[in-house]
Image (cartoon, rainbow, N blue to C red):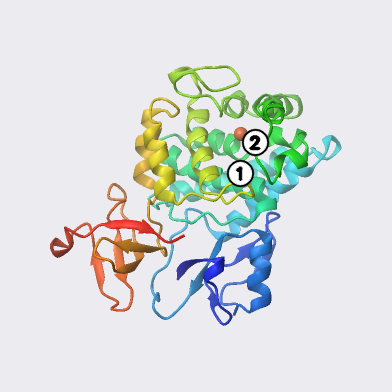
């Protein structure tokens, strides 16, 4: 399969992934043959692109951090959690525990999978997809931080609920198709505290879950909010959620900003190491997040183009690639003849 932006889709192309909406409902199934009507609908929904199957990319498959069933279940749980009012909160704690247990089990059983996904979410369902992605990235970092099962459960719970305070903000502000005014920004910055208070008031989560939610906008150098904590005073759960949150937000297409490609988002995170982000967390993050995700088209320094076939942790700049037209497979990490060849950009 390969990733294609919506504008490059053509009728007759075959979908290479199941597509869900933010409630976890399946919209289109893998192998569906796209026509003009569905391509336009995907664009209107706000999906930046999709994976398609074609002859050239047979055998290129993305190993996912979590199975589609768990991702879909998580979306539904997060969606219901965000939309339920105070009278419907009974039982929600068990629901979240159930999802978190599944995520942690999967991460512990198969934690050596890199995060290789292009960020595919619809505009209006941003919050639910974002919560899921932050949960997945945080779980991956936590597993490689060698957290215990109990610690991972705390981390994933806090990650899935990190923005729950936004349920108290006006939808017009949250989904505004423009930059926010100063006053609106001030209101939005209240969401960590609102989320913390909501969780404390209604549930019996481990106190570290609430702390992770409260501190997820703190900066390593103390310039974040709301408590202006710094360094190791910030909960480790919040330090991990922080990096997952920024990465996912930057690589998301939003009504008021274009998505960055993973390489640019990773570069930003590296540039803010120690100022915005905790160095230990950055170290793990850059090892396990694919700079050029599998299935993406890249430009090579000799002018050729290729599809990324496989990534290896620690060598994220030099994946295995399949050159367009010739079909030549080059392992940029080990192939001696290719040592002068570099990736100079990604098509997104
Ligand atoms: Fe947030």
Q: Is residue 229 left or right of residue 263?
A: right
**Can you tell which mark lies on residue 281?**
none
Q: Position of residue 232 (x, y in %)?
A: 44, 19
Q: Is residue 236 above or below residue 261?
A: above
Instruction: Report the Cα–Cα distance between label 1 and label 2.
Output: 7 Å
Which corner quadrant of the image does residue 338 belong to?
bottom left
Residue at 42%, 25% in the rendered image: 275
Residues at marks 1 and 2 touching, judged by CB atoms closer than 8 Å: yes
**Label 2 element class:** loop
Q: Is residue 290 left or right of residue 23?
A: left
Q: 305 or 66, which lies in front?
A: 305
**Label 1 element class:** helix
Q: Is residue 158 left or right of residue 316?
A: right
Residue 104 visible? The answer is: no
- The local crowd at label 2, few if under 14, some if 14 to 19, many if 20 or more residues have their Cα within 10 Å, is many
Q: Decide if ligand 1 comes within 8 Å of the CB at mark 2.
A: yes
Q: Position of residue 306 (x, y in %)?
A: 33, 68
Q: Is residue 102 left or right of residue 149?
A: right
Quadrant that contains the N terminus: bottom left
Residue 120 visible? The answer is: yes
Label 1 vs 2, first from the N-terminus: 1
Q: Position of residue 168 (x, y in %)?
A: 77, 33
Q: Which residue is mark 2?
A: 163
**Can you tell which mark lies on residue 131?**
1
Q: 238 or 221, which lies in front?
A: 221
Which corner quadrant of the image does residue 93 belong to?
top right
Residue projecting furthest to the right: 87
Which corner quadrant of the image does residue 305 belong to?
bottom left
């Amino acid at each position: 399969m390969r990733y294609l932006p919506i504008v490059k889709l053509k009728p007759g192309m075959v979908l290479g992934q199941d597509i869900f909406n933010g409630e976890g409902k399946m919209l289109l199934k893998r192998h569906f043959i796209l026509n003009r009507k569905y391509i336009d609908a995907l664009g209107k929904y706000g999906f930046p692109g999709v994976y398609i199957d074609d002859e050239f990319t047979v055998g290129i498959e993305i190993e996912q951090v979590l199975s589609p069933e768990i991702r879909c279940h998580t979306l539904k749980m997060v969606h219901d959690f965000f939309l339920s009012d105070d009278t419907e909160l009974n039982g929600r704690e068990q629901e979240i525990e159930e999802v978190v247990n599944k995520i942690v089990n999967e991460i512990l059983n198969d934690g050596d999978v890199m995060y290789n996904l292009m960020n595919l979410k619809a505009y209006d369902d941003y919050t639910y997809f974002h919560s899921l992605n932050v949960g997945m990235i945080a779980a991956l970092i936590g597993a490689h931080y060698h957290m215990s099962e109990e610690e991972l459960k705390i981390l994933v719970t806090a990650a899935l609920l990190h923005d729950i305070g936004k349920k108290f903000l006006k939808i017009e502000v949250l989904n505004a198709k423009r930059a926010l005014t100063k006053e609106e920004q001030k209101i939005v910055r209240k969401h960590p505290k609102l989320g913390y208070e909501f969780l404390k008031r209604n549930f019996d989560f481990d106190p570290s879950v609430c702390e992770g939610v409260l501190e997820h906008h703190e900066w390593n150098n103390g310039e974040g909010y709301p408590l202006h904590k710094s360094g190791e005073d910030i909960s480790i759960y919040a330090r991990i959620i922080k990096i997952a949150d920024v990465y996912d937000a930057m690589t998301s297409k939003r009504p008021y900003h274009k998505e960055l490609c993973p390489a640019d988002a990773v570069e930003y995170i590296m540039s803010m190491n120690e100022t915005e982000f905790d160095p230990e967390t950055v170290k793990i993050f850059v090892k396990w997040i694919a700079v050029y995700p599998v299935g993406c088209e890249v430009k090579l320094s000799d002018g050729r183009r290729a599809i990324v076939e496989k990534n290896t942790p620690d060598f994220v700049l030099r994946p295995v690639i399949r050159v367009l037209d010739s079909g030549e497979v080059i392992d940029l990490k080990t192939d001696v003849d290719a040592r002068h060849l570099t990736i100079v950009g990604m098509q997104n």
